[in-house]
Every structure is written in structure tokens, then in C-alpha cells.
Amino acid sequence: MTGAARRDQILSAARRVFAEGGYAASTDEVARAAGVSQPYVVRLFGSKRDLFLAAYQQATGEILTSLSAVPAGPDAGERMGDAYVRLLEDRDLLRLVMHGFTAGTDPDVGRAARHCLGEAFRLFVERTGEEPDEGRRFVAFGMLINVLMATDAPAHLGEDPGMDALLSCVQESVQERRTA
């Protein structure tokens, strides 16, 4: 396996491990998930922080690439919403992004998190021609989806009537996009 392929293998494992355990997960856990030694992970990435940052930047980059692929036009808002809904298929991606938001006090992680939010907003407003308030709604709804996924809300139906109602409302909206 080439060095680049091994690096990708470790980043893929880091994505799963950090999505599950957040920044508290260890490089040893990532190494086991990737099938390599922990010293090899550290040699490639330098530190757990650098590994987390690399996985996080890759994840936020995927989100922005997906949104950037939508051309400007009258249906850009719908298409950007559809692009984001397609990202829901990778639960690890969105959970890792949430962990990055909570680790945002780290200067580099925080910069990447702020860039992801700001760029999603900018792209929406630019591509749709909508007012900034619509861009805020788009980003806010995406964050709501992320929070619901991070808290594993769908697996806990029946525990709380308010959450059940919120989840139903969000799931209806997402389902409409999936079937449109």
C-alpha cells in the first residue's frame, strides 16, 4: 500500500473513531481501527490534535464541496438542500463535524469550523440570490439536523414528546427532499 493510501486509510478510521468518541478518542483507537501501529499514526500525523484536525478539515471540505457543486440559479436553494440531505447518509461525517464545533476553542479547529459555517452561508446566499436571512435559515436547519443526529434522536422516539414532535417535523422536511 502506498503512503498516500495508508494515510487515507488512517483518516477514514479517524473519521469513524472521532465521530464516535470525539476528541477524547485516542490515536491508539484510531490505529487499531486502521490496522496499523499507534507509532505509525503519530509518525504520519504528529499528534492526536493534528490527526483530528486533518480528519475534521477533510469532513468540512466534503460538505463545502457538495454545496459548491450546486450552480447558481433559481433552483439553487432546493439543490443545496438536496445536496446536504445526501450527506446524511454518512452519519460519521456529520457527527465528526459536531465534535469539531465543540472542540472549536482550539484555534485551528475553531477556524475550520467557522469557515465551514460561514462558507455554507456565503455559498447559499451567492448561489440562490436570497437575502441573508434565508442563508441563516439554511445553515440553522443544517445545524439542527446535525444536532439531532449527534444526539441519536431518531433512536429515542417516545422518550420526550417535545423531541418527538421536533424530530417528526424535521424528518418530514428531509423526507420530502429525498423523494423529490
Image (tube, rainbow, N blue to C red):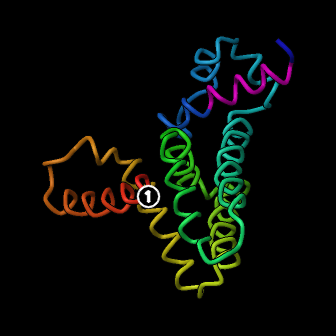
Q: Pick whichever, 102 or 151, lies toward us.
A: 151
Q: Nearer the viewer, residue 26 or 92?
A: 92
Q: Which amino acid does label 1 sit on?
A: Ala
Residue 140 percent location from the top left of the image: 48, 70
Q: Mark 1 points at which residue?
A: 180
Q: Picture coordinates of residue 178 (x, y %)?
A: 43, 52
Task: Give the magenta range.
Answer: 3-14
Secondary structure at badge 1 equals loop
The quadrant where residue 96 appears: top right
Q: Residue furthest front?
A: 180
Q: In this view, does 50 lie above or below 8?
A: below
Label 1 crowd bin: few (<14), some (14–19), many (20+), radius 10 Å: few
Q: How many labels does the image show?
A: 1
What secondary structure prevails in the magenta region? Answer: helix
Residue 12 inside the magenta-drawn segment:
yes
Q: Is residue 82 left or right of residue 115?
A: left
Q: As rendered, which of 30 and 155 lies closer to the eye? A: 155
Q: Does the magenta stretch include residue 115?
A: no
User: Looking at this view, is 27 or 171 the one in front?
Assistant: 171
Give the side of residue 135 with respect to residue 12, left or right.
left
Residue 55 image offset from top left, x and y in percent: 68, 39
Residue 72: x, y in percent? 71, 73
Identified at 40% across, 53% down, the residue is: 179
Residue at 73%, 40% (x, y): give it. Answer: 54
